[in-house]
């Protein structure tokens, strides 16, 4: 991985070319962060939703191009954006084969983790990005591929750094704390940064960074 200094330089160059100056402020874990996936069918349903395919293809608006998905190249995870539903269907097929290979038991060993990534942006720029989609207020940010991938790297690094912090969330079980610390995580089955649905929480803008973990192994 490039150094964060190099990545920040890339972001500054892309801002100068016209990318929105959206920057990661911090990430948060809350009582919504962990959900157990209890069956193969539920796993495939969650993957379909995250990839906006199948029964969830109606969620694939124009801003889906901003999402960053995990794919596999051999055994190595790669992170990329997609342009077509066919690409997302191919990712679905790849992850489904991978899940079959690692043989989850669905007895408390598969979890969905949802982390909120909160972003900063100058107010004058933010107002220009506000719009209404399907009756809901949201945001659309014009960003280059290099900028989005650099922003994703910031989210990925922030998640790894969170594993080393003594984080306290009142409702978490010890098992959930282990996942925060990335302890006993045998496999990362899938990850995605959902930039197609950027939301507002008391004036703070955020998107969701979602991971599916296989525990143990």
Image (spheres, rainbow, N blue to C red):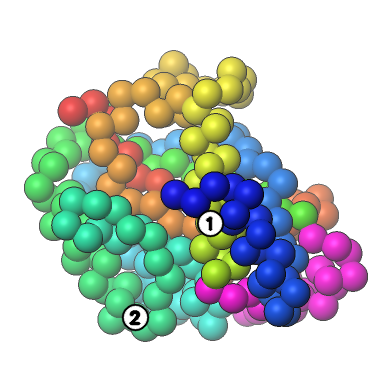
Are the residues flagged by discs 1 and 2 in contact, CB closer than 8 Å? no
Residue 88 percent location from the top left of the image: 32, 73
Bin the neighbour count of mark 2 within 10 Å (Cα to Cα): few under 14, some 14-19, many 20 and up.
Answer: some
Q: Nearer the viewer, residue 13 or 209?
A: 13
Specify the quadrant of the image occupied by residue 36: top left
Residue 132 relative to residue 79: left or right: right
Residue 217 relative to residue 158: left or right: left
Residue 116 percent location from the top left of the image: 60, 46
Q: Identify whether 86 is placed above or below 202.
A: below
Q: Residue at point 11% right, 41% down?
A: 103
Answer yes or no: is residue 209 visible: no
How far is mark 1 from mark 2, CA to CA?
21 Å
Answer yes or no: is residue 167 visible: yes
Mark found first going from the N terminus, 1 or 2: 2
Q: Residue at point 25% right, 65% down?
A: 92
Q: Identify whether 62 is placed above or below 98.
A: below
Q: Nearer the viewer, residue 183 or 59?
A: 183
Q: Identify whether 189 is placed above or below 169.
A: below
Check residue 85 in the rendering and tell me which mark sits there, or answer none: 2
Residue 160 percent location from the top left of the image: 49, 35
Which callout, 1 or 2, points to the residue nearer the camera?
Answer: 1
Q: Residue at point 24% right, 52% down?
A: 76
Residue 129 in the magenta stretch? The answer is yes
Check residue 114 in the rendering and tell me which mark sits there, or answer none: none
Residue 159 relative to residue 134: left or right: left
Residue 203 percent location from the top left of the image: 82, 54
| Quadrant for the C terminus in the image | top left
- Secondary structure under badge 1? helix
Residue tagged by mark 1? 152
Residue 206 in the magenta stretch? The answer is no
Magenta-tinted stretch: 121-145
């Amino acid at each position: 991985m490039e150094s964060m200094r190099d990545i920040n330089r890339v972001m500054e160059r892309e801002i100068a070319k016209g990318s929105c100056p959206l920057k990661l402020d911090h990430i948060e874990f809350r009582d919504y962060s962990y959900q157990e996936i209890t069956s193969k069918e539920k796993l495939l349903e969650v993957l379909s939703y995250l990839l906006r395919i199948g029964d969830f293809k109606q969620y694939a608006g124009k801003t889906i191009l901003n999402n960053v998905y995990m794919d596999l190249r051999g055994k190595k995870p790669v992170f990329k954006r997609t342009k077509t539903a066919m690409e997302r269907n191919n990712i679905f097929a790849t992850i489904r084969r991978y899940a079959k290979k690692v043989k989850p038991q669905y007895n408390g060993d598969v979890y969905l983790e949802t982390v909120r990534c909160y972003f900063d942006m100058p107010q004058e720029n933010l107002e220009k990005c506000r719009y209404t989609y399907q009756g809901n207020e949201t945001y659309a940010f014009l960003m280059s591929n290099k900028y989005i991938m650099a922003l994703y790297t910031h989210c990925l690094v922030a998640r790894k750094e969170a594993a080393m912090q003594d984080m306290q969330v009142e409702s978490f079980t010890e098992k959930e704390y282990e996942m925060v610390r990335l302890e006993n995580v045998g496999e990362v089955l899938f990850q995605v940064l959902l930039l197609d649905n950027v939301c507002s929480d008391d004036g703070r803008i955020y998107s969701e960074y979602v991971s599916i973990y296989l525990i143990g192994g």
